[in-house]
Amino acid sequence: TAPIVVRNANGTAYSGAVAPSVDRMWVLYRKTDPQGAVRSTIYYKAMRLMVRLPRPVALTAPDANGAQQLRSVLVSGNVGPYEVDWVRGRIYFTEVDEGRLITVRYNPASNGNIGGLSQALTYRITWGDEISTSAQTYADPANPQTPTLAFTVYETSPEVVMPSDTAVNEGQISAFKDPIQDKLWVFWSSTRGRTTDLFYQALAPSLYIGTNNQR
């Protein structure tokens, strides 16, 4: 709610009792890497329908309660709701907009400084890697000698090792989304006990680096 990040198709703040569903694609697979730290184990990635903006989205100044809201984010060409990931500079959409060509204008942010409304940016809505694992700060290419105009980009990880006590010969993966809670149930076979056996666990990863001012 602070900032409000979910918007109706026309750009107004979403005010329904239940937020729109999140269209997320999970990919799990067995990978063998003789040179890696884990030679044979299970990896996963999460993907969403999105567009990537060149910079994070600017927020308004905090009000008396410390709450902030998004500055201008104008999206056109979509037919469904969308979610603005202001920290990472992404806009997420639902499956009704997959492959659609859209236009975005917004106020970019650079290290707390607010830029003017951008020119019209045209994107094709496609599946993109969602998980971010690190933050990198870059100089503004237009003002490389001005540190105050630096901006932060959250690097995306294409894959993550599934947490496990040990990994010997993991394979035969099966998974399904929990119908009630936001987690994934994963089943797989392994010979870690010297004989083939079935293992399972619930997977509920932290998809993003946290922010300290979002409510």
Image: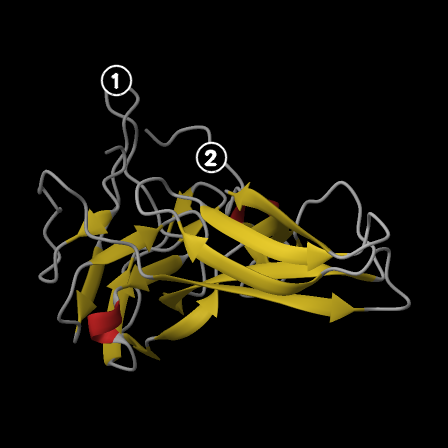
Q: Residue at x 60, y 63 (%)?
A: 173
Q: Residue at x 33, y 78 (%)?
A: 123
Q: Quadrant of the N terminus?
A: top left
Compared with 161, 34 (above or below) is below
**Amino acid type, mark 1:** Asn
* Dot 2 amino acid type: Thr
Q: Where does label 1 land, which residue?
A: 65
Between circles 2 and 1, the one closer to the viewer is 2
Q: Earlier in the sequence, mark 2 or mark 1?
A: 1
Q: Residue 169 lies in what quarter of the image?
A: bottom right
Q: Nearer the viewer, residue 57 or 159?
A: 159
Compared to residue 20, the image places residue 67 above or below, namely above
Q: Label 1 near label 2: C-beta < 8 Å?
A: no
Q: Name the residue nearer the viewer: 24 or 31.
A: 31
Where residue 147 appears, as percent x and y from the top left, is 61, 47
Where does the image place residue 15, in percent across and percent down from the top left? Answer: 9, 41
Q: Is residue 51 above or below residue 162?
A: below
For the C terminus, the quadrant is: top left
Vertical order, 63 against 146 (above or below): above
Callout 2: SS: loop
Furthest residue to the front?
195
Q: How is the image coloured?
A: secondary structure
**Residue 146 at x, y percent in the picture:** 59, 50
Determine if residue 152 is in view.
Answer: no
* In-image side of 84 versus 90 (left or right): left
Secondary structure type for disc 1: loop
Work out whether residue 26 can be spotted.
yes
Q: Quick check: 40 left or right of 112?
A: right
The label number, if any, that marks residue 211 in the structure image = 2
